[in-house]
Amino acid sequence: MAGNPMRQPGAGQTRRRGAALEEAILRAAVDELTESGYGGLTIDKVATRAGTNKNAIYRRWPNRLTLGIAAYRQLATTVPPPDTGNLRGDVLELLRQANRHWSSPLGAILRELLSAAGGTSELLAQLQEQSGDAAAAPWLIVLGRAVARGEASPEALHPRVATVAIVLLRNEFVMRGIPTAPDDVLVEIVDEVYLPLVRQRGMTPS
């Protein structure tokens, strides 16, 4: 009698398809990523761990980097923006949160992925909570609160202005290759770059 076409020969398990197979692949990729980092992530290892073949992975993720990014996004969590009562405190705490994350084992994976993504804007956007708009959201929130308190002009509410501090911190990790940023660097970014830029927005040229 012919075998059940929905079973893999010798596996004794129903062949997974669609969302179930994708979930198994992602779970395997997450396990490989946390155990070995992006440098140790391979399509072969993920396929073996997920109990599938490489073609099933490549149909969903065209290369190792896109699979790594998808796995990282399963691990990443979002934290509510701080509310210290003033713009300087909020921005400094946001930078400290980012610094702690990027200095952690999960952050080391993120740094590997950022380096591998290079200047590919689409992949960078996926790493930044799915889109540039989402990545800018907490910074626009704290800046919006500052505008409401009268600490900043409404003209300061621009995504590039709002996120300049986190971009500078990211450069410390990506360009300099540091394992963590000293707190005095965070303070310098806030006091010497971010706050002067925000205060300048909306000022009438003399």
Image: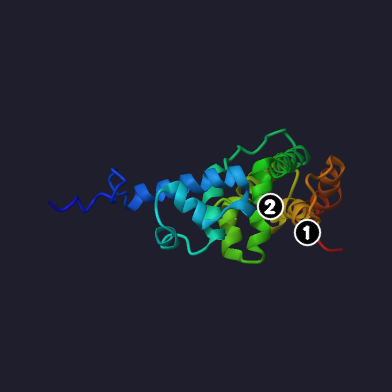
Earlier along the polypeptide chain: callout 1 or callout 2?
A: 2
**Can I make out residue 148 in this image?**
no
- In the image shown, does 90 or 176 lie closer to the viewer? 176
Residue that badge 1 annotates: 175
Where does residue 15 sit, x and y in percent of width and height? 30, 49
Residue depicted at 49% across the width and 51% down the height: 46
Could you say which quadrant of the image residue 142 lies in? top right
Residue that badge 2 annotates: 111
Q: Which part of the image, by quadrant, shows the C terminus?
A: bottom right
128 lies above or below 122:
above
Neighbor class of circle 2 (other Cα within 10 Å; few <14, some 14-19, many 20+) is: many
- In the image shown, does 149 or 67 lie closer to the viewer? 67
Secondary structure at badge 1 equals loop
The amino acid on which the numbered mark 1 sits, given as a three-letter code, is Met
Residue depicted at 55% across the width and 54% down the height: 68
**Can I make out residue 116 in this image?**
yes
Could you say which quadrant of the image residue 122 lies in? bottom right
Number of dots carrying numbers: 2
The amino acid on which the numbered mark 2 sits, given as a three-letter code, is Arg
Where does residue 72 sit, x and y in percent of width and height? 56, 48
